[in-house]
Image (cartoon, coloured by chain):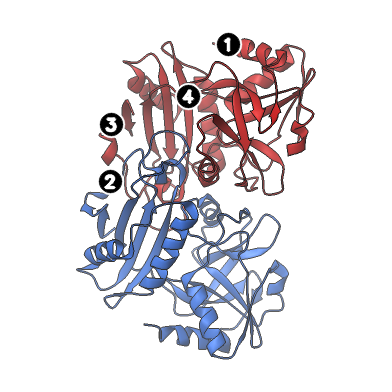
Chain colours: A blue, B red
Amino acid sequence: MLALLVNGVECPPERAVSAQDRGLSYGDGLFETMLLRDGRVRYLAHHLARLAFGCERLGIRYPGDECLKTEIERVRRTHTNGVVKVIVTRGTGSRGYRPLRDAEPTRIVSLHASPQVPSAGIRVRWCSTPLSRNTLLAGIKHLNRLEQVLAQAEWDDPDVAEGLMCDSEGELISATAANVFIVRGRELWTPDLRYCGIRGIMRARIIEHAHGLGFDVQEAPLRPDDLESATEVFVTNAVRGVRAVIALGDREWPVGPVTQALTKAVETDA
Amino acid sequence: MLALLVNGVECPPERAVSAQDRGLSYGDGLFETMLLRDGRVRYLAHHLARLAFGCERLGIRYPGDECLKTEIERVRRTHTNGVVKVIVTRGTGSRGYRPLRDAEPTRIVSLHASPQVPSAGIRVRWCSTPLSRNTLLAGIKHLNRLEQVLAQAEWDDPDVAEGLMCDSEGELISATAANVFIVRGRELWTPDLRYCGIRGIMRARIIEHAHGLGFDVQEAPLRPDDLESATEVFVTNAVRGVRAVIALGDREWPVGPVTQALTKAVETDA
């Protein structure tokens, strides 16, 4: 961690948050991780919009764009590259699940080192940890992430960069920390996330650019065996961008033309 | 909060926990809430056993009975009644879901005021927030509790003490912060919790005492309409004990003989 503000106050990371914060007690909050590149936070407005939407869904008071932008600017000031993480929780509370109506949300804004992103494609594997279905929690980036933690604990081979996850009914949903796209010729398919998964910022950008490039895009329920007929596969997230999937077990794919065209297209985003 | 130890160190609650604690980042941990009564922590061994089991399930290093008992004794020392809460998280970590193999767990041990428990029965309602199914997370008392938070946010009538929750497939699972039992004559029924829900300490005590009293106990999938034929209904948790349900909407029940017998039986526990 390179910099940290908790409710706008600089503090040592190791003694930063209340023992009664509901983010800690119940995962009662949301987060965003954003790419700082060349002095700019990419897709800042999109991230804040998703965070505001998540707050509304959970009934947490959104701290406001201006407040968060100011604090993001303060943590990134002396850096030009890195990852900005924002956590907003429902704030501190007494024991018990019931949320206080007038709770003051907690803001935790931090800057972290940039991740290493491979220039070529990545190898992925299947995870056996299922994602559970709950339409109330689907789409938003809340703090209840034990399923992703358990999924990433399933392997430690550094040559495998991501794991694909299905939900409890066997539908393909996402990678552990990325959305997934399947390409068949000029058609793109991605899970519709109606029951679980996170609606990624890069996922939305890819869908928009794909339309612009004349590809057909379907958000639909997918199954693991839909990968069999794929001509290309890639995963996306806001920090690591588009990553071509070149292998899943014995199955291999090229870094194909559609993946390349979309990678190039999102580079034109501000 | 009456007393607090974080990793064995007294500290002010408002600056207690690392901004990088995985309990906060992902709900990557477990908790227990125990009743301190007349200077004794009730069912301490049962609580610690469940916590150890949960740690094993999540791959978190269990701090050990002796360590936790010592810290519980330190926070409760000057009090004879209250609620002891223990949180164990996977510890601090860098950004990213992947758990570190050698992470040092975080222990947060605190003492809180006793809750008010009604002497008569309670009114309950239905919650519309569903519980999601995941066999890996079922039974244990982990920190991913957004579903319970959203369920308790559904009502604010102080005359309604609890809400009943179903899972995403419509099975009756539990109350928001208690297990549920249905009585029909001398038969007891309680949800089997194979997909979700928490295996309560008091639930297990009730099942054992019910056997001892010659009642027939079934752990089985239940549906909301199973309540229709119930002659008694009650909910249980370790802090509030056994509470008879006397009303659910227009449906009313007496505080019946089975509920009374079991309430009396668990009072004989050490």
- Element type at marker 2? helix
Q: Confirm whether circles 4 and 3 share one chain.
A: yes
Mark with earlier residue (1, 3)? 3
Judge depth for marks 4 and 2 and give the one in front. 4
Residue that carries the numbered disc 4 in the rendered image: B34
Q: Are marks 2 and 1 in contact (CB under 8 Å)?
A: no
Residue that carries the numbered disc 2 in the rendered image: A14
The image shows residue B54 at horizontal and vertical percentages of 54, 37
Mark with earlier residue (1, 4)? 4
Q: Confirm whether circles 2 and 1 share one chain.
A: no
Label 1, label 3: how far apart the Cα atoms are: 34 Å
Q: Amino acid at mark 3?
A: Val
Q: Is residue A96 visible?
A: yes
Residue found 73% across the figure and 16% down from its top: B211
Q: Is residue A201 left or right of residue B126?
A: left
Q: Is residue A120 left or right of residue A197?
A: left
The image shows residue A35 at horizontal and vertical percentages of 36, 71
Label 4, label 2: how far apart the Cα atoms are: 27 Å
Label 2, label 3: how far apart the Cα atoms are: 13 Å
- Element type at marker 1? helix
Question: Which chain hosts label 3?
Answer: B
- Element type at marker 4? strand
Residue that carries the numbered disc 3 in the rendered image: B9
Q: Is residue B199 visible?
A: no
Residue that carries the numbered disc 1 in the rendered image: B267
Label 4, label 3: how far apart the Cα atoms are: 21 Å
Q: Confirm whether circles 2 and 3 share one chain.
A: no
Label 2, label 1: how far apart the Cα atoms are: 43 Å
Judge depth for marks 4 and 3 and give the one in front. 4
Relative height, residue A110 to residue B211 (above, below)? below
